[in-house]
Image: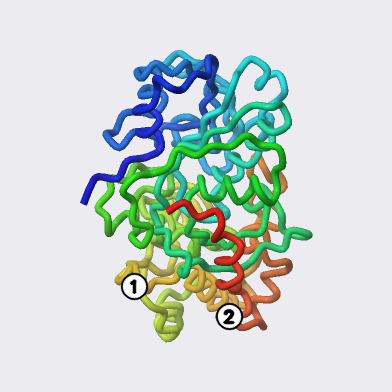
Amino acid sequence: MANVLYGIDQLCLQANSFTYKRVALVTNNAATTSGGILSRVALLQAGISVVKLFSPEHGLTAKGDDGAYQDHHVDTITLLPVVSLYGDHLVPAKEEMADIDCVLYDIPDVGCRFYTYLWTMTYVMEACAAFGKPFFVLDRPNPGGGDISKSEGPSLDETHCSSFIGRWDIPVRHCCTLGELAFFFAATRIKNLDLQVFKVQHWNRQQNAAAADWQFTPTSPAIRDLETVLLYPGMGMLEGINVNEGRGTEQAFKIMGAPWINAAQLHHAFTGLQLSGIASAVAEYIPAWGLYAGERCYGLQFTITDAQSFEPVKTGLALLQCIKLLYPLTCRERLYPTVANPLGSGHLDKLTGVYQSFEKLGNMLLTEFDIDKKDWLIRIQPYLLY
């Protein structure tokens, strides 16, 4: 099978025909060519006139703390100015767009609605539409796979739950590339955008990255490997309640716990759910930072046993429901302050997309949280590129 080539590889091959003189690039250090060269370096080497960088949450290094302020600075590698889109503002300002001819977007995503790189893309798309700048997505495979039948809900209640971790209604696990979502949003949300996508070559969307044996570069401090990519759309929801989601350890989203959990009891209850593709074990650990830093936590450690049958969102919701039912007097919603949500309120609702989701977890069937997969396929089908 031919090697997968990313959008950045395609653009570099066509650099001679790319005539824009002053180019801005939205990127971070996780964005490389298929050969491992930083995208911004590869573009400059190909003769493309990148004059400015925009960076998302976690900064240009992709190593900044979750939700933490990122400042403007100068890139030490290219000496280009870096405008942070996760600091004083989330949207490029008029003056930051005035001296460029177009914007390129190249940031690896993980295929989850509440991962913020996607929403940074939509804000840049809106700025490009407003100021008449062409927008190019240098597309990448979805590392969790592109099989739309594996998409999972809940849907997003835009009236009550729209935020920077979910502006618009798409599934939590959407199974699309960012290029596909860019076309979808350009057609349904952002008018008058000059949009082009440099497509991935030789990608089979039925495969996740692990099955295709792609090299994975950590996309942020907590997303360190492909197993975490698959766990994250479900286990990421643990941020919404008062348990440690593995931050402060080397196993974020692979381990969870709290001082008040009985690990053996939770393990018995979780195992009894007989969820597909995942195994759990009793865990005991002390996080070095994050929630319950320095305190002994008791909980579970997770291993994906079958990526094809594993349903991360269903699993995460089932675990939330299990914890809430086992510990009704102790389990509660959690404030999760970030640059985009300084008060940290309503975080669970923003993650799930479901209004008053904490209360509903106690009395709704998990199937009531899921999307209508046929409806999502109908909505997204015209914009699928692969």
To which quarter of the image does residue 45 belong?
top left
255 left or right of 350 in image = left
9 left or right of 293 in image = left
Which-is-in-front pick, marks 1 and 2? Answer: 2
Judged from this view, the residue extending furthest toward the left is 1
Q: CA distance from mark 1 to mark 2?
A: 26 Å
At x 45% / y 13%, what residue is drawn?
A: 79
Mark number for residue 281? 1
Residue of label 2: 367
Please, what is the three-letter code of the amino acid marked with disc 2? Thr
Q: Tell me the element at label 1.
A: strand
Residue toward you, 377 or 58: 377
Asked if one can make out residue 81 in the rendered structure from this viewpoint, the answer is: no
Asked if one can make out residue 3 in the rendered structure from this viewpoint, the answer is: yes
Where is residue 367? Give x, y as percent.
58, 80
Residue toward you, 157 or 304: 157
Where is residue 140? Give x, y as percent.
41, 44
Please, what is the three-letter code of the amino acid marked with disc 1? Ala
Label whose residue precedes the other's in the sequence (1 or 2): 1
Q: Is residue 138 above or below residue 110?
A: above
81 left or right of 76 in image = right
Q: Are marks 1 and 2 in contact (CB under 8 Å)?
A: no
Query: Badge 1, how many Cα within 10 Å: few under 14, some, many 20+?
Result: some
